[in-house]
Image (tube, grey):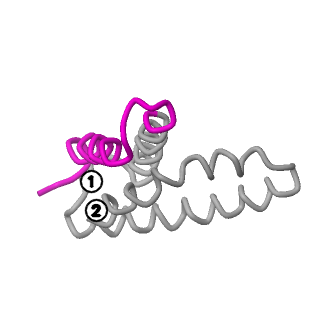
């Protein structure tokens, strides 16, 4: 549920994220550092969810984090290009992630 909520929060913020990565190089280093910390936190969360049996353990936490990021990016592109509403993109992103990574 936490990962699903994250999609609902992050997809609408995609245009800001895109804008920020086009800032001057001095800002870019700080953003890369923050993104590295965020990724490390995400991997800890994923490992915890795997240990609890909520996410598949057949893939590494690093792989699952990359898949999540890829799905997030795809959803944002759909919204940016007007091919989906934010709600539709969140639903599609979650169903895609859930069908391959979530254990029930």
Query: Looking at the magenta stretch, what is its main secondary structure?
Result: helix
Q: Secondary structure at mark 1?
A: loop
At 16% from the left edge and 55% from the top edge, which residue is drawn?
103
x and y percentages locating residue 42 in the rendered image? 46, 62
Q: Is residue 10 a member of the stretch shown in magenta?
A: no
Image quadrant holding the N terminus, namely bottom left
Q: Please tell me which residue lies in front, 81 or 44.
A: 81
Name the residue tied to disc 2.
50
Of labels 2 and 1, earlier in sequence is 2
Q: Is residue 95 a member of the stretch shown in magenta?
A: yes
At 22% from the left edge and 52% from the top edge, which residue is drawn?
102
At 33% from the left edge and 69% from the top edge, which residue is drawn?
48
Q: CA distance from mark 2 to mark 1?
A: 6 Å
Residues in magenta, as a range? 78-104
Q: Is residue 25 above or below residue 48?
A: above
x and y percentages locating residue 39 in the rendered image? 54, 59
Image quadrant holding the C terminus, namely bottom left
Rendering quarter of residue 92: top left
In the picture, measured across the screen, residue 20 lies left or right of residue 56, that is right
In the picture, measured across the screen, residue 82 lies left or right of residue 17, that is left
Question: Is the residue under label 1 in contact with that under label 2 (CB below 8 Å)?
Answer: yes
Name the residue tied to disc 1.
57
Q: Is residue 52 above or below residue 74?
A: below
Q: Please tell me which residue lies in front, 23 or 97.
A: 23
Tag shown at residue 89: none
At 28% from the left edge and 62% from the top edge, which residue is drawn?
50
In the picture, measured across the screen, residue 41 lies left or right of residue 97, that is right
Rendering quarter of residue 55: bottom left
Q: Is residue 42 above or below residue 83?
A: below
Disc 1 packing (10 Å; few <14; some 14–19; many ≥20): some
Q: Secondary structure at mark 2?
A: helix
């Amino acid at each position: 549920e936490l990962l699903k909520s994250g999609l609902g929060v992050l997809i609408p913020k995609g245009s800001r994220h895109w804008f920020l990565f086009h800032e001057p190089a001095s800002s870019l280093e700080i953003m890369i550092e923050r993104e590295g910390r965020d990724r490390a936190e995400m991997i800890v969360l994923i490992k915890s969810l795997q240990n609890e049996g909520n996410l598949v353990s057949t893939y590494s936490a690093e792989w699952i984090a990359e898949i999540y990021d890829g799905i997030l990016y795809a959803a944002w592109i759909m919204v940016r290009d007007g091919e989906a509403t934010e709600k539709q993109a969140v639903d599609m992103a979650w169903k895609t992630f859930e069908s391959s990574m979530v254990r029930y």
